[in-house]
Structures are given as structure tokens and as C-alpha cells.
Amino acid sequence: MSDRHLRRSGDDYRDAFLELLPQGQAWPKHTMDSVLWQVCDGLCDYWGFVDSRAADLLEQESAPRITQELLPDWERNWGLPDPCYSAPQTIGERQRALVMRMTLLGAQSRQFYIDVAAEIGYSITISEYRPFMVGLDRCGDNRVYGDGSVPMFSPTWFWPYAPIVNPNGEPVGDGELSEWPNYGLGPPENRFYWTVHVHKTSLTWFRVGAGGGQTGIDPHLRIGHAEDLECILQRWKPAHTEIIFDYSGLTPDDPMAGTP
């Protein structure tokens, strides 16, 4: 069984302190209206406050997901706030950024970048390219229509084992025409480009309580732009690649998303 942390009040410290005093009529420690008892009660009330503050540090401020008072110290030790975040952040956003930085393992897969974008409030998909290759590709329009299966695969796709997607990088729907399966004729450098399709804006609603907003500082609703997303992905992308950000499929999210 794990140890359980106990909070002790000023009354607990007073009773313990009185028990340490000598016995006898000169020490009326069991009489509540005596000067001795009242002095001990007043002095030990402060130690109850100290115990409570120490408990706050142990129970709350030592946990990065819920820390508030020591959040600036946590951020300083983990290199935060990130210079990519130019806009003001709520306490909840700062806590999430801290946890993401502490648990970040790093990768170069599409799913890694999609998850990073989701952490800061964006929905994205990614398209990768390669040049036309004789013996693997076909001339003409080799796009395919969705058959309703998700994910869908086809031997005519540019990678038979890669799921077929639409121009927005999403799984192709039933009867929907897929994107072009390759970049067509072009230089071999095409393989070093990839497109990030940003689909929805980031909405940050004001919240009260732990991890929420601050009255007089945070607005009721902040509509996020993707400057922070572009900054982070440009920093973490493979050094030999270039990112193309596509906002043509940008749609407003549910305006009441995240509200009760």
C-alpha cells in the first residue's frame, strides 16, 4: 500500500505541542480559557498554515499537469514558453505545452506531426510526393474513386500499401475522386516536399478554475491562427525537406466546440 499524505491543521499542531509541555498546575494545558492554551493555539495556527502550503506543493505543484504557482519555474527548466507561441496563452495551454515538452519522444512520421498539431489545437493531414517512375506508374489519369472502405488501398496507387486519400489528405470517401497519386513529371527533388493541409481553426474558450483563463487577461474566445503550427513544424521537420502549407480546405470548426 502506498503512503498517504495527511494534511494537519493548526489544531493538530496545538494538541501535539500541548502534550509536550510538562505536567502540573503551573501548566494549565487542558484549560481552554487559560493564557497558556490560547498562546499555544495562536502560535500553532501558523504551523497549520505552513503544513497546508507544503501539502499544496506536494500534491499540486509537483504535478506538471495541474501546477499553477510553480508553473513559471517548470517552464523555465524546460525551455518554455516556446518562441513559436507569440500569442498569449491560458494557464491550461501552458500546462499542456509543458506536459508535451516533458513527454515528447520525437519522430519523423506523419502521425507524429499530426499528433503535435492536435496538441496545440489544429486538425491537419499530410501529403507526401515522389516523381513519376517508369515501370511503377501509369500514364494518364490514374486517380481512383473511393469504394467505401476506410482505409482504401489500390495497386494503381503510388504506394500500394499507402491508404488512398483525397486532395485534402483525408481518407477518400465512397464515390469520391482521390488526389493525384504522384507529382507527375518533374525533378527528383519533388520527393523532398510535403504538404500540410490545415482543416480547422483553433478555438480557445475562456474557462474558470484550475487550468482555465484569467479574468481581465484572457478573452471570452480566442481564434487561433496557424503561425505557431508553421513555426513548430518548420523547426522539427527533417532538415532536407520543405513544407507546403495548404489552407484551401480550411473550414470553421463548430463555433460552440468545447463549451458545455
Image (cartoon, rainbow, N blue to C red):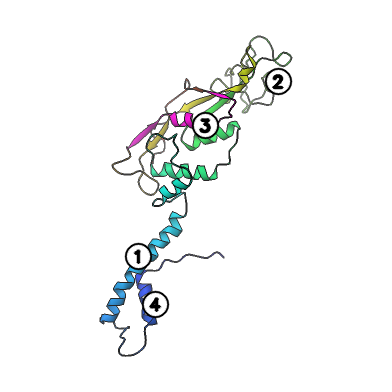
> Mark 4 highlights which residue?
16
Nearest to N terminus: mark 3 or mark 4: 4
The quarter of the picture where the C terminus appears is: top left
Above or below — where is 118 with respect to 148? Answer: below
> Mark 3 highlights which residue?
235
Task: Report whether 99 appears left or right of 142.
Answer: left
Residue at the top extreme? 140
> Mark 2 highlights which residue?
155
> Mark 1 highlights which residue?
49
- Three-letter residue code for mark 3: Arg
Nearest to N terminus: mark 1 or mark 4: 4
- Three-letter residue code for mark 1: Phe
Asked if the residue at tag 4 contacts the one at tag 3, i.e. Cβ–Cβ closer than 8 Å, the answer is no
Element under disc 2: loop
Q: Which residues are magenta?
A: 219-243
Residue 126 position in % (x across, y down): 56, 26
Nearest to N terminus: mark 2 or mark 1: 1
Element under disc 4: helix
Residue 11 within the segment the image draws in magenta = no
Mark 3 neighbour class, 10 Å CA radius: few under 14, some 14 to 19, many 20 or more:
few
Relative depth, front residue between 32 and 256:
32
The Cα atoms of the two marked residues, 2 and 3, are separated by 35 Å
Q: Nearer the viewer, mark 3 or mark 4?
A: 3
Nearest to N terminus: mark 3 or mark 1: 1
